[in-house]
């Protein structure tokens, strides 16, 4: 509720302020274009009455030339208006998109999960485009239509006040039709955006999970799921379009009746009062201009309705205060020690037993700590608290003796390098992906990081080496290659803390042993926390923490755990069957 109230206070108009000069010029030029347009029917009526009917060709040429000049001036004004309006609206959209993306980047994992990826994509693309188009329309049609309406009304009444009777009947009917249609359409526009969220969500899931879909031969199932979301989007859009389409024939009917009425009244005036024929032509043009401008206004109100729904969704993101807030510590000091003091944690919105329960654990600077436990025991949750992907519910997590909640987030996360089990790579070259760890690194530093991560060998086998292009998500690489590139990226950062979240699972024992030895040699002062499923991956660690149901039950070196921990012995025996394995 608090966020909803705050979102109502956020004004997207502030993003147009840097372009206010262009936003003012656009309507001014539009005024010029409309003024030129309003002169045309009057000039045409004079050509007919003063020139053609009186056989005065000089008048026809003079007024015709004036019409051409006005048309050219109006055209220049229209082009200028279009340029300035588009520049202002596109710049507005660009700045707004940057602001929303920056906000999304600042949100916690909990908050992005709550919005859903599909919804955030829709808000960053379609919703902002709706608002951008609205700004362009505001600077053009919202100026042109009212001016044509008012100007046409004045010019028509100047011709003869009897035309006011026609407008007095037709305009209220037309306005009533617009109000009724838009009133019903407004809630449907929000539904359209929500349905678009669903389509984007299904699409995003299937693009990311394409291999799983194919492996389980689930293409038909996913096609049906997409078809359902897409059909709902189509049906909702169809409801809106059907509703809006009713407006055009009603308005055209009113317009045609009005033109017939103008001709009838004009004809009567000609017979009774000697009314000029050219003025009847001008009246028809002005009434058409008035009715068409009202139609344009109604279309503009559709844009308002759609844009307001999109703006509300954008404001929801901008109003969302990051739950993980910055602290005040910006000094990057210490040796990378980590300590959990009586830490309890459960994921937002969940109930029951906490994921972590009264955890106490200290990792000294430069120590190599392994964390071993069953699936769901809380291993990943434990390390997620170090970089504040989530905050504890009870207790403290200390890095270099300071509570992580007191750190500036950039400073805290700059101390650590987190290597995930699922390697995230980006479309670009091998070197660009490794350089994510340090964008200012030299080619030699990139190569050295790859050597430590045991990646240099396979990189050099590529035809283009470090300039080899990697597809999105690294689909052109094997699981082990992706993990080694992710590790190289982390090494390049030269962090004080390195967290491996089961991120060597795709490596063979020999390569993993070689990696561990390289880490010991090259990053001997770095604190290493390694989550693993294999005993062979952790046996050489300084200490191994055993985690069971969210609690640390033992923490000691391998040899000591074999003696005192029944859980560790069970894991060891089940995996190594006596321990005859070369762990490097």
Image: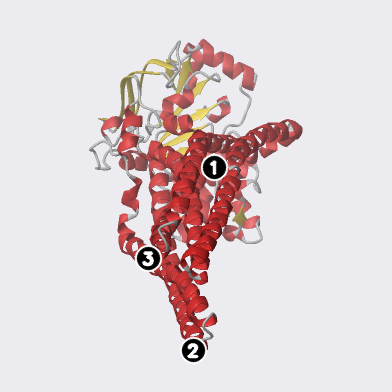
Query: Residue 387: x and y, percent?
Result: 38, 34
Q: CA distance from mark 3 to mark 1?
A: 53 Å
Q: Nearer the viewer, mark 3 or mark 1?
A: 3
Q: Who is closer to the viewer here, 394 or 271?
A: 271
Q: Which residue is mark 1?
A: 424
Q: Earlier in the sequence, mark 2 or mark 3?
A: 3
Q: Which residue is mark 2?
A: 58
Kindly identify the residue that appears in the image at 54 percent across and 37 percent down. 118
Q: Who is closer to the viewer here, 5 or 531?
A: 5
Kindly identify the residue that appears in the image at 32 percent across and 44 percent down. 11
Residue 162: numbered disc: none
Q: Who is closer to the viewer here, 116 or 19?
A: 19
Q: Nearer the viewer, mark 1 or mark 2?
A: 2
Q: Is residue 253 above or below residue 553?
A: below
Residue at far front of view = 272
Q: CA distance from mark 2 to mark 3?
A: 30 Å
Query: Residue 145: x and y, percent?
Result: 44, 57
Query: Residue 190: x and y, percent?
Result: 50, 35
Q: Is residue 10 above or below residue 21?
A: above
Q: Who is closer to the viewer here, 483 or 11?
A: 11
Q: Is residue 37 above or below residue 573?
A: below
Residue 31: numbered disc: 3
Q: Earlier in the sequence, mark 1 or mark 2?
A: 2
Query: Residue 260: x and y, percent?
Result: 57, 56
Crowding at dot 2, Cα within 10 Å, few <14 / some 14-19 / many 20+, comes out as few
Image quadrant holding the C terminus, namely top right
Kindly identify the residue that appears in the image at 47 percent across and 18 percent down. 546
Q: CA distance from mark 1 to mark 2?
A: 78 Å
Question: Which element type, helix, strand or loop, lies under badge 2?
Answer: helix
Question: Which element type, helix, strand or loop, lies under badge 3?
Answer: helix
| Circle 3/circle 1 CB separation < 8 Å | no
């Amino acid at each position: 509720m608090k966020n909803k109230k705050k979102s109502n206070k956020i004004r997207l108009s502030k993003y147009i302020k840097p372009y206010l000069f262009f936003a003012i010029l656009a309507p001014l030029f539009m005024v010029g274009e409309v003024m030129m347009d309003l002169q045309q029917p009057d000039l045409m009526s004079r050509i007919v009455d003063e020139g053609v009917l009186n056989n005065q060709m000089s008048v026809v040429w003079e007024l015709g030339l004036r019409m051409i000049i006005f048309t050219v001036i109006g055209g220049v004004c229209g082009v200028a208006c279009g340029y300035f309006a588009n520049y202002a609206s596109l710049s507005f959209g660009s700045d707004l998109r940057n602001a929303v993306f920056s906000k999304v980047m600042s949100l916690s994992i909990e908050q992005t999960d709550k919005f859903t990826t599909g919804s955030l994509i829709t808000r960053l693309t379609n919703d902002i485009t709706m608002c951008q188009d609205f700004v362009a329309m505001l600077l053009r049609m919202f100026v042109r239509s009212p001016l044509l309406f008012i100007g046409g009304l004045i010019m028509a009444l100047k011709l003869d006040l009897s035309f006011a009777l026609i407008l007095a009947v037709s305009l209220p009917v037309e306005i009533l039709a617009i109000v009724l249609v838009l009133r019903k359409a407004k809630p449907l526009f929000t539904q359209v955006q929500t349905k678009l969220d669903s389509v984007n969500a299904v699409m995003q899931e299937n693009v990311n999970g394409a291999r799983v879909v194919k492996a389980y031969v689930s293409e038909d199932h996913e096609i049906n799921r997409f078809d359902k979301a897409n059909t709902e989007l189509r049906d909702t859009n169809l409801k809106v379009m059907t509703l809006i389409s009713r407006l055009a024939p009603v308005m055209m009917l009113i317009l045609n009746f009005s033109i017939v009425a103008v001709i009838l009244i004009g004809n009567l005036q000609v017979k009774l009062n000697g009314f000029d024929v050219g003025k009847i032509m001008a009246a028809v043009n002005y009434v058409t201009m008035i009715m068409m401008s009202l139609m344009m206004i109604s279309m503009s109100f559709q844009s308002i309705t759609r844009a307001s729904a999109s703006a509300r969704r954008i404001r929801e993101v901008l109003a969302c205060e990051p739950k993980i807030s910055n602290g005040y510590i910006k000094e990057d000091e210490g040796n990378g020690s980590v300590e959990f003091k009586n830490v309890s944690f459960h994921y937002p919105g969940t109930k029951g037993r906490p994921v972590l329960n009264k955890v106490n654990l200290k990792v000294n600077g430069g120590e190599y700590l392994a964390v071993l436990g069953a699936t769901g025991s809380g291993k990943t949750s434990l390390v997620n608290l170090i970089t504040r992907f989530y905050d504890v519910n009870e207790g403290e997590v200390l890095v270099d003796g300071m509570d992580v909640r007191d750190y500036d987030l950039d400073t805290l996360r700059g101390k650590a390098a987190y290597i995930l089990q699922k390697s995230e790579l980006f479309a670009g070259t091998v070197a660009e992906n490794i350089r994510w760890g340090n964008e200012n690194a030299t080619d030699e530093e990139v190569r050295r990081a790859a050597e430590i991560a045991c990646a240099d060998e396979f990189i050099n086998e590529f035809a283009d080496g470090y300039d080899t292009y990697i597809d999105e998500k690294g689909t052109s690489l094997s699981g082990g290659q992706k993990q080694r590139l992710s590790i190289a990226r982390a090494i390049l950062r030269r962090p004080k803390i390195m967290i491996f979240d089961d991120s060597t699972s795709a490596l063979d024992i020999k390569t993993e042993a070689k990696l561990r030895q390289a880490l010991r040699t090259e990053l001997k002062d770095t604190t290493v926390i390694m989550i693993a499923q294999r005993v062979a991956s952790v046996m050489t660690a300084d200490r191994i923490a055993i985690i069971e149901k969210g609690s640390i039950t033992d923490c000691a070196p391998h040899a000591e755990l074999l003696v005192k921990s029944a859980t560790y012995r069970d894991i060891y025996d089940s995996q190594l069957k006596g321990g005859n394995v070369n762990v490097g």
